[in-house]
Amino acid sequence: MEMWITSLAVVVVTALSMIWHLKRGEHAERRAAPRPPRRCPRCAADVPERVSTCPACGVPLQAYELVLAPVAVAGPEPTGALHAMVRADVCVGCGACVSACPVPGAIRLDGKLAVVDKGLCQGHGECVKACPVNGILLTAGAAVQRVEAPDLDVHFQSNVPGLYIVGELGGRGLIKNAVNEGRIAVEHVAATLGGSPADDPRMLDVIVVGSGPAGLSAGLEALRSGLRYLVLEQGDLSDTIFRYPRHKLLLAEPVRMPMYGDLWVADASKEALLAVWRAIIERTALEVRTGYRVAAIVPCDGGFEVEAGDEVFRTRRVVLAMGRRGNPRRLEVPGEALPKVFYDIIEMEAFAGGRVLVVGGGDSAVESAVGLANQAATTVTLSYRGDAFSRIKDRNRAKLEAERVRGRIQVLLRSQVREIRPECVVLEVEGRPHQLPNDHVIVRIGGEPPSAFLQQLGVRIVTKEVALTQASSDEVREEVARA
């Protein structure tokens, strides 16, 4: 009996030993096996690890981060310990969350973006309550950034054949990405047209709508490719720059513009970027028609009819390079074109120490005022023409009242801006003139978002999930600092 038990034990031990060695061999083979090469989304060429640009077609792979991101799907709520997550596309770097968090170091400002240390975060949610722009949430799942964007292919063509969407309207507003996307889209236009001229000599090959970074790049690529093109801009060329929500613009590395060469803007003002824009257009003789607001785009005979200004243009392809923020409503007062006027904010710390006037009576205006009040030595005034803030969320009402009681926000009801001057703003307050010393004006009185326009065209809008690993979070911070 003992011998039988001993023999059985030997067999079991031997079997377990063999299984362990086999498993170990499998793991070793798995570790030794090379990773499958990355493929360029555009030309399918192999791209070595740690290389950011396709060696075959020269396309930067970062341009496809959002296009290739999975569409968000409904599913069961993740379980586990709650932690805060910052939405990088919403965060304005005001620092209100840092002050509110009861755990030192759990959330901090890293450049122009709030960053959560998941090892320290205890899920209190105080940062969520304090954030003036609803840019923080509590989650138990993976860190992902949800972005609403048009459903595009790797050539930035939408589900409407021949209609391309690039730049900020496509979900990413960084200058570097916008320039690359405009070029990639028009390269595909040129390739698909194959050099064959249109039957109608009045038919254009491509119309580019918008003259910002994406539109300028798309137009220059159309010029370089010998296409019959036109760039339409609804305002003046300067409008595309002065509507930028950033106080300073920075490209930490050069971006190649078609027909021009390297574009490198180092910690420049919007005026400096405008000067570069004008120099590019003058040097290349790019045809940009300003004052042409596109009212309608209608598919017609394999192409499109574009109604803009008082004219109707026919084109085989359309590239939309408009801003994602749409057309902000303007005050229509003298001095509104001064560079001190902004229609949105991306980095609040750039206004620290300044005298800021926020105009508007909705949630966006109140959120901007509360965030600016959190900046060191900043004087904030909120001007609204109504008798009371009747359209804002309760949480925003409470935050505004708390900052007003602390003396950090001055509220001027029944007031309207009459003139903006370099050193002050002239208001009418309850029927009386009032001069307010001022450095910056933030206008948040609504606008016409482009989403309705896209839906009229039949463009499909989806919610993408962009994973934010530690590496990609670092990239986001780097991009935010550069843009």
Image: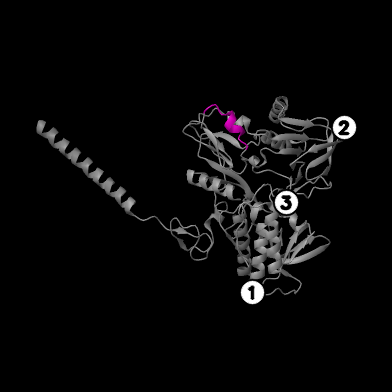
Nearest the camera: 380 or 56?
A: 380
The kind of secondary structure element at disc 2 is loop
Amino acid on which disc 1 is placed? Gly
Task: State the mark number for residue 242.
Answer: 3
Spatial CA distance of label 3 from label 1 is 37 Å
The residue segment tinted magenta is 94-103
Vertical position of residue 285 compared to residue 67: above or below: below
Residue 230 at x, y percent in the picture? 73, 66
Instruction: Nearest to the eye among marks 1 and 2: give it.
Output: 2
Vertical position of residue 143 compared to residue 43: above or below: above
Nearest the camera: 266 or 139?
A: 266
Horizontal side, residue 433 vs residue 473: left or right = right
Mark 3–mark 1 CB contact (< 8 Å): no
Nearest the camera: 305 or 288?
A: 288
Amino acid on which disc 3 is placed? Phe
Task: State the mark number for residue 195.
Answer: 1
The kind of secondary structure element at disc 1 is loop
Residue 458 at x, y percent in the picture? 70, 54
Residue 389 makes an appearance in the image: no
Q: Is residue 453 magenta?
A: no
Q: Residues within 10 Å of mark 2 (few under 14, many from 20)?
A: some
In which quadrant will I find the N terminus? Answer: top left
Vertical position of residue 86 compared to residue 466: above or below: above
The kind of secondary structure element at disc 3 is helix
The residue located at (41%, 57%) in the rendering is: 36
